[in-house]
C-alpha cells in the first residue's frame, strides 16, 4: 500500500474519532448543566476541565481570558485557530478523504463531506443551549454512520488496519486523559449529596460511551473504582483501554503477518509495553497512582504514534 494512502486513512480515523469524542463531551456537559442542580456546575473550574481533556491550556489562554461556557465551547467546537477543535478535525478528515476518494467507499466520503458542510453553516452565536446540544448529538450520529460504513463496506486489507491504528490510539489517549482529569479532581464537596455523586459519575461514563453498558452490568451502583476498572480493564466494553489495546496488537500482527521484522521492532516493542500495562484487572493492582498510570498510557500512545510514523513512513502524527 502507498504510504500516502495509509497516512490519509490513519488521519481520517483519528480525527473523526477525536471530533466525535469532543462533541460527546460537550453534549454531556451541556446536559449536566441543564439537568443538575449542583451550584458548582458551570463554574470556571468546570469548563476548565473540558480544555484539560481536549486541548492545550496555554494555547487556550493565548486567545481567551477566562474559562466560561461560550469561550470553551467556541474554542473546542468551532475555533479555526485551534488545530484540535471539532471544526479542524472534520476539516482534516475531509482533506485526507478527498485525496483518496478512489480508495474509500463513496458513502464514507459523503458522510465526511456532509459533516464539513454542516459545521461550516452552523452559527454558534445565535443558538440556544438545547439547539447546541442537538447539534453535537448530530455529529455523534454521523460518526455512528461513519463507523457503520467502515464496518460494512471497507475491505479488510491493509488500509483497514491503519483505520484501526488511528481510531483506537485516539480512544485510549482520550479515555486516559478524561479519567485522569475527572478521577483526580478534588470534588469531595459535591459528594455530600447522593444525587450529585450519581450524576457526576454517570456524566463521566456518558462522555466515554460507557453509561448504558455499565448500568446493564452493575445496575445503579455508581462506584468510582468499579467505573474506572470497567473503563480501563473490561474486555467486554468495546471502548475500554484493554479492548482497544488488543485491537492495536491484532492490527499489527495482521499487517506484519505475525512476524517481527527489523523495521517493525520498535513498534512491536512499544505495543508490547502498552499491552503489559493492561494485564492487571483492577486499579488496586497498579504499582503507582491512577494519575501516573493515565499519564503513562498517554505517553505510550504518543510513542506508538511516532513508531507507526517511522515504520510505515507516514506524515506527522499529532499527539493531541
Image: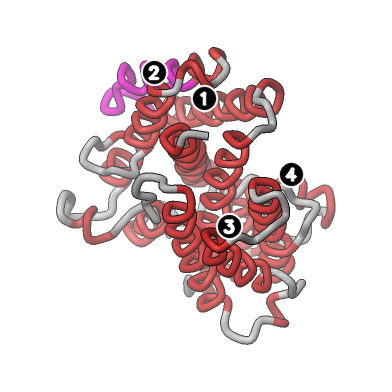
Q: Residues within 10 Å of mark 4 (few under 14, many from 20)?
A: few
State the colouring used for the structure image: secondary structure
Residue 292 vertical placement versus 105 (above, below): below
Please indicate, yes or no, whether residue 186 appears anywhere in the rendered image: yes
Mark with earlier residue (2, 3):
2
Badge 2 marks a residue whose secondary structure is: helix
Task: Determine which residue is flagged by label 1.
Answer: 138
Which mark identifies residue 118? 2
Q: Alpha-carbon distance for marks 4 and 3?
A: 15 Å
Mark with earlier residue (1, 2):
2
Disc 4 or disc 2, which is closer to the eye?
2
Badge 1 marks a residue whose secondary structure is: helix
| Magenta residue span | 112-128
Q: Is residue 311 left or right of residue 250?
A: left
Disc 4 or disc 3, which is closer to the eye?
4
Q: Main secondary structure of the magenta part?
A: helix
Residue 143 vertical placement versus 52 (above, below): above
Q: At 56% from the left edge and 75% from the top edge, which residue is drawn? A: 293
Q: Where in the figure is residue 19, as x and y percent of width and height?
A: 45, 38
Marks 1/2 in contact by CB < 8 Å: the verdict is yes
Which mark identifies residue 212? 4
Marks 4/2 in contact by CB < 8 Å: the verdict is no
Q: Alpha-carbon distance for marks 1 and 3?
A: 24 Å
Which mark identifies residue 189? none
Task: Determine which residue is flagged by label 3.
Answer: 200
Mark with earlier residue (4, 2):
2
Q: At 72% from the left edge and 47% from the top edge, which residue is drawn? A: 238
Amino acid at each position: 500500500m502507498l504510504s500516502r494512502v495509509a497516512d490519509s486513512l490513519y488521519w481520517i480515523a483519528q480525527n473523526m474519532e477525536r471530533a466525535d469524542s469532543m462533541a460527546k463531551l460537550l453534549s454531556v456537559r451541556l446536559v449536566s448543566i441543564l439537568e443538575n442542580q449542583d451550584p458548582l456546575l458551570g463554574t470556571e473550574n468546570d469548563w476548565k476541565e473540558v480544555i484539560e481533556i481536549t486541548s492545550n491550556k496555554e494555547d487556550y489562554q493565548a486567545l481567551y481570558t477566562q474559562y466560561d461556557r461560550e469561550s470553551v465551547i467556541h474554542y473546542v467546537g468551532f475555533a479555526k485557530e485551534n488545530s484540535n477543535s471539532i471544526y479542524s478535525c472534520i476539516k482534516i478528515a475531509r482533506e485526507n478523504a478527498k485525496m483518496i476518494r478512489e480508495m474509500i467507499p463513496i458513502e464514507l466520503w459523503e458522510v465526511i463531506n456532509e459533516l464539513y458542510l454542516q459545521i461550516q453553516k452552523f452559527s454558534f452565536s445565535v443558538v440556544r443551549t438545547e439547539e447546541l446540544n442537538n447539534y453535537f448529538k448530530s455529529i455523534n450520529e454521523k460518526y455512528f454512520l461513519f463507523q457503520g460504513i467502515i464496518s460494512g463496506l471497507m475491505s479488510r486489507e491493509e488500509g483497514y488496519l491503519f483505520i484501526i491504528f488511528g481510531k483506537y490510539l485516539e480512544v485510549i489517549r482520550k479515555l486516559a486523559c478524561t479519567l485522569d482529569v475527572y478521577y483526580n479532581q478534588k470534588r469531595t464537596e459535591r459528594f455530600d449529596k447522593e444525587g450529585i455523586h450519581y450524576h457526576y459519575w454517570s456524566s463521566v461514563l456518558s462522555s466515554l460511551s460507557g453509561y448504558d453498558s455499565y448500568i446493564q452490568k452493575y445496575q445503579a451502583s455508581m462506584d468510582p473504582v468499579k467505573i474506572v476498572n470497567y473503563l480501563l480493564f473490561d474486555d467486554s466494553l468495546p471502548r475500554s483501554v484493554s479492548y482497544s489495546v488488543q485491537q492495536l496488537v491484532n492490527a499489527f500482527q495482521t499487517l506484519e503477518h505475525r512476524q517481527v521484522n527489523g523495521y517493525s521492532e520498535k513498534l512491536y516493542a512499544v505495543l508490547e509495553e502498552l499491552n503489559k500495562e493492561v494485564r492487571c484487572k483492577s486499579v488496586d493492582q497498579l504499582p503507582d497512582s491512577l494519575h501516573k498510570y493515565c499519564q503513562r498510557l498517554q505517553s505510550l500512545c504518543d510513542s506508538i504514534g511516532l513508531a507507526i510514523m517511522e515504520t510505515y513512513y507516514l506524515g506527522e502524527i499529532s499527539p493531541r
